[in-house]
């Protein structure tokens, strides 16, 4: 097995192990997958009115990232991240997993894929059997997707926030910052329609540098809140900032 595939499968196993603690609970979400060609980082952020949305994602450091949500097919996530580790395009990954030969329930699935080297060709699939409001949108190096949303503005605002230029000229935003901003924009638009003002019950952000150990990516923050508790997207930002300051020695 090639090193890239070993690394991709290692990090996937971590996410699967966590997800199996609450099977089929990633039934609705909005998420972002993205890559940064300058830093060669790959990452994702997501939120859902379910207890463990982080079970939807898998990263192949230096290659790409995939989310498998709605019914969250773990086999498809495994196959997809393995393809990314070998250099497959997002379109190739979608074609491989979103069909009736691979998955008899393929129309109940939703996928988002982004890969380095294919920034102009991020891809997603939203099955006809996923629940409204649903949809996906793509931009340079990014795909945003969601189902059981309050409205289409959730993914529209998330994509716009990710692609927005930095507030100050001649500055840049890190991939993690852009992912968090996108997730926050989706929450402000209403998020998962089942959660009301809370917008979600769980959230995550993950970013891997090209040489990261996938089991311990540079950034991995996961939040889970009880029903009626704090907004996990807001808590995610707070925990991310604390972790960032700790890394910087503040």
Image (cartoon, rainbow, N blue to C red):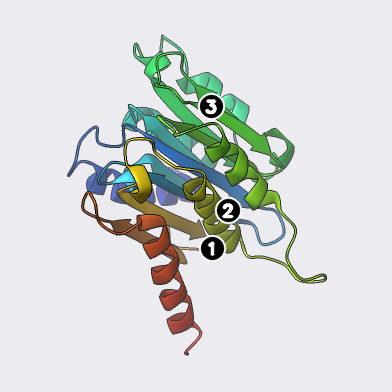
Q: Badge 2 is on which residue?
A: 62
Mark 1: few, some, or many residues within 10 Å (few <14, many ≥20)? few
Q: Secondary structure at mark 3?
A: strand
Q: Earlier in the sequence, mark 2 or mark 3?
A: 2
Identify which residue is drawn at 73% across, 64% down.
166
- Relative vertical location of residue 148 with respect to residue 203 in this rendering, above or below: above
Q: Earlier in the sequence, mark 2 or mark 1?
A: 2
Outermost residue on the left side: it is 21
> Residue 126's x, y, as percent?
50, 22
Identify which residue is drawn at 38% across, 35% down.
193
Q: Badge 3 is on which residue?
A: 135
Q: Secondary structure at mark 2?
A: loop
Q: Badge 1 is on which residue?
A: 211
Residue 161 located left or right of residue 225: right
Marks 2 and 1 in Cβ contact (< 8 Å): yes
Q: Is residue 89 visible?
A: no
Outermost residue on the bottom side: it is 250
Quarter residue 113 falls in: top right
Identify which residue is drawn at 33% across, 44% down.
53
Mark 3: few, some, or many residues within 10 Å (few <14, many ≥20)? many
Q: Looking at this view, is 22 or 157 the one in front?
A: 157
């Amino acid at each position: 097995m090639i090193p890239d595939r070993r690394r991709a499968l290692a990090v996937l196993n971590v996410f699967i192990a966590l997800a199996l603690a609450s099977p089929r609970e990633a039934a609705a979400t909005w998420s972002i997958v993205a890559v940064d060609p300058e830093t060669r980082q790959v990452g994702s952020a997501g939120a859902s009115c379910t207890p463990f949305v982080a079970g939807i994602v898998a990263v192949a450091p230096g290659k790409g990232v995939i989310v498998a949500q709605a019914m969250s097919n773990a086999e498809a996530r495994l196959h997809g991240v393995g393809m990314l580790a070998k250099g497959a395009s997002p379109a190739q990954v979608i074609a491989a997993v979103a069909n009736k030969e691979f998955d008899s329930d393929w129309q109940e699935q939703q996928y988002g894929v982004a890969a380095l080297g294919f920034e102009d060709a991020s891809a997603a699939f939203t099955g006809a059997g996923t629940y409204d409001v649903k949809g996906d949108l793509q931009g340079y190096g990014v795909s945003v997707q969601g189902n059981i949303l309050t409205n289409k503005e959730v993914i529209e605002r998330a994509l716009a926030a990710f692609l927005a230029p930095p507030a100050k000229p001649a500055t840049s935003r890190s991939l993690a910052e852009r992912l968090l901003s996108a997730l926050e924009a989706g929450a402000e638009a209403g998020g998962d329609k089942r959660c009301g003002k809370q917008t979600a019950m769980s959230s995550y952000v993950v970013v891997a540098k090209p040489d990261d150990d996938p089991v311990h990516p540079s950034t991995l923050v996961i939040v889970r809140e009880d029903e009626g508790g704090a907004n996990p997207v807001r808590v995610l930002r707070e925990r991310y900032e604390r972790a960032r300051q700790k890394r910087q020695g503040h």
